[in-house]
Amino acid sequence: LLVQWLVFFFFVIGSVATTAEDDGSLSICNCDDEDSLFSYETILDSQKVGDFLIAIAYFSIPIELLYFVSRTNVPSPYNWVVCEFIAFIVLCGMTHLLAGFTYGPHWAWVMTAVTVFKMLTGIVSFLTALSLVTLLPLLLKAKVREFMLSKKTRELDREVGIIMKQTETSLHVRMLTTKIRTSLDRHTILYTTLVELSKTLGLKNCAVWIPNEIKTEMNLTHELRPRIDDENENENVSGYAGFSIPITESDVVRIKRSEEVNMLSAGSVLASVTSRGKPGPTVGIRVPMLRVCNFKGGTPEAIHMCYAILVCVLPLRQPQGWTYQELEIVKV
């Protein structure tokens, strides 16, 4: 935009000068009039002051460039370019400084110095212009590389943020898992399992039989319907509280040896005790027991596998028995 305005300005000045020259109106300049604002002496003095100011400005720019280079790590391939610009600016300043002494009577060496410095300025200016031909592509390439690096940096920062968020989430999950494991005991977990199974399958009752410490008996430890509420139901049922059967009982041995769901007959002790009387269709399956000390890094590890038995009893009004889908639910 600045270049366009300069071109327009010089175009207007040139047009006005050409028109004035054609019309012969240039003779209205009162340069010889000493009382005029634009007298010959005034113009020379103004140009002299302008040259001195330009020289001062040109001499201050290299000082600023040298200070900038000393404060920053300029890559070595660009040092010669900086030196060229400094030489070009200094020579321009010397040309204007010496030109300031040529507006009046001056020595011959002043004109010689002006000529020499103008020649040097022209040579250095030409070399600097040639240097820009090779420098500009390098600068553009460096700018593109800087843009790509900044884009890559933003992507890496975003990925690091995602990783940190995932790490923080994983930490919260581990803390939550630890809190759940410490707050929920085995009894709460087993009772919740019995309740959910009963709701899903419509069970009459379900119970968990756990071996004692010396592995000689199976004890009825958990069931859906507490027997203390059934004391007045019949005398036989009240006798089932804390019931134990030998671990060598045939149904117990058969269930522990198999990973599948086992059907229990109506005469089975496990079925009779769990159903509190005449049992409906009854199944049993072994349940691995893991001690709390076997949890390592959040993953259970069975060192000495010990099995409990889960017994599920359907109501008597379901003579059709267990369906395949129901057996799969129990197994899962």
Image (spheres, rainbow, N blue to C red):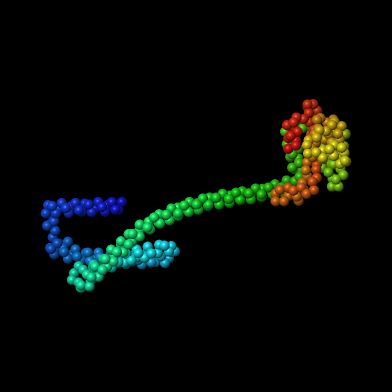
Residue 251, percent across and down?
A: 85, 37
Residue 24, percent across and down?
A: 11, 54
So how many labels did they put on this image?
A: 0
Q: Is residue 17 above or below residue 71?
A: above
Tell me where residue 331 sits by quadrant. top right
**Left or right: 303 with respect to 53?**
right
Residue in the picture at 50% in, 52% down: 152
Image quarter (top left, top right, bottom left or bottom right) of the C terminus: top right
Residue 109, percent across and down?
A: 22, 73
Which sits in the foreground, 21 or 175? 21
**Left or right: 134 with respect to 170?**
left
Tell me where residue 287 sits by quadrant. top right
**Left or right: 183 with respect to 102?**
right
Residue in the picture at 48% in, 54% down: 149
Which sits in the foreground, 188 or 299? 299
Residue 304, percent across and down?
A: 80, 48
Q: Please say whether residue 156 is visible from this viewpoint.
A: yes
Q: Please say whether residue 276 is visible from this viewpoint.
A: no
Q: Is residue 156 above or below residue 219?
A: below
Residue in the picture at 42% in, 54% down: 141
